[in-house]
Image (cartoon, rainbow, N blue to C red):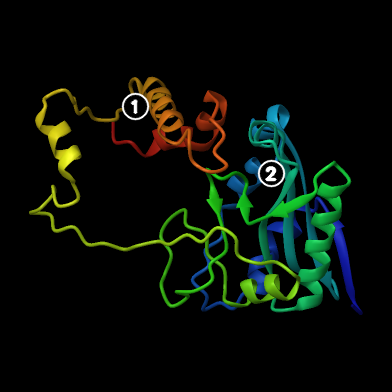
Amino acid sequence: MSGLSLVERDFDAFFSVPFHAYATETPFVSIMRSDLRRILSHRNPLFPRFGQFTFFTAHRDGEAVGRIVAHIHEESNRLHGLKLGYFGFFDCANDQDVAKLLLETAESWVTERGCDKIAGNFNLTAMQQIGVVTEGFEHVPYTDMHYNPAHIPELLEACGYHASFPMQTWETDVPPTMPDTGLGQRQQAAVDSGELRWARVRRRGFWTTLEHIRQLLNGSFANNQMFVPLTREELEFQAGEMMWIIDH
């Protein structure tokens, strides 16, 4: 590992990693610097109440070529009876020594805090960007979808990781003249019942609408694997800025 070093909590280096590690032709799009800084701070209500975290960058010959977040969601462990730690924002050059250093560092960090397993990517919970892209690299990702180059799953496998919860993403064209094509019988019956009321999301009353969304989300996902109910503070932190892209 000649020329390879590790630094903890160097935010500027952490943000810069994908620009050094990934080729310019990759469809990877970085999160905005200000958003990443906000997420990886104790302004994020996830951490003061439910968890703890840190982040690391790997440097080769002075250049940041890999990064990882190590974190623990204590409420998730309590709710699901686990001692599980997580890694997230795992991005690095196609260099097994870099990957090994980052992953072993995250493993040691969560083990020292009482965890007996680690899983990832989680950026930073199961309700945010999650997973590792393992195929379909020829497709361009959509907004808020996780993306990584093909060498990332290869590096994870070489470091002893394996896929445990497969997921898929579909792209579907819905003709504008056929808005009901995605409705099943039960959904159509609910629409026809007259019991549903549709309303625009507006800036006025936005926070009340967001709270209704939170209650619906928590009720709908309650039985999903690894789900932890979102608090009002968490959802407002994650989605509150949507208010500024609403027309009126």
Task: Please name the amino acid that badge 2 sits on.
Answer: Leu
Q: Position of residue 247 (x, y in %)?
A: 29, 36
Q: Residue furthest right?
A: 2
Q: Position of residue 42 (x, y in %)?
A: 71, 34
User: Pointer 1: what residue?
Assistant: 203
Q: Locate residue 167 relative to residue 7 in the image: left or right.
A: left
User: Pointer 2: what residue?
Assistant: 40
Where is the N terminus found, in terms of image quarters? bottom right
What residue appears at the point 34 percent right and 20 percent down from the top-left corner?
205
168 w.r.t. 38: above or below: below
220 w.r.t. 146: above or below: above
Q: Position of residue 56 (x, y in %)?
A: 79, 56
Task: Please name the amino acid that badge 1 sits on.
Answer: Arg
Neighbour class for label 2 at 10 Å: few (<14), some, many (≥20)? some
Q: Position of residue 158 (x, y in %)?
A: 73, 76
* Residue 63 showing in the rendered view: no
What residue appears at the point 56 percent right and 55 percent down from the top-left corner?
31
Give the mark toward the camera: 1 or 2.
2
Q: Residue furthest front?
A: 81
Label ID, residue 27: none
What residue appears at the point 80 percent right and 53 percent down from the top-left corner?
10
Name the quadrant containing residue 190.
Answer: top left
Where is the C terminus found, in terms of image quarters? top left
Whichever of labels 1 and 2 marks the residue nearer the N terminus, that label is: 2
* Residue 142 showing in the rendered view: yes
What residue appears at the point 72 percent right and 34 percent down from the top-left corner?
74
Q: Nearer the viewer, residue 53 or 205?
A: 53
Callout 1: SS: loop
Q: Locate residue 63 relative to residue 175 in the image: left or right.
A: right
- Give the Cα separation between the discs numbered 1 and 2: 27 Å
Q: Locate residue 178 relative to residue 14 in the image: left or right.
A: left
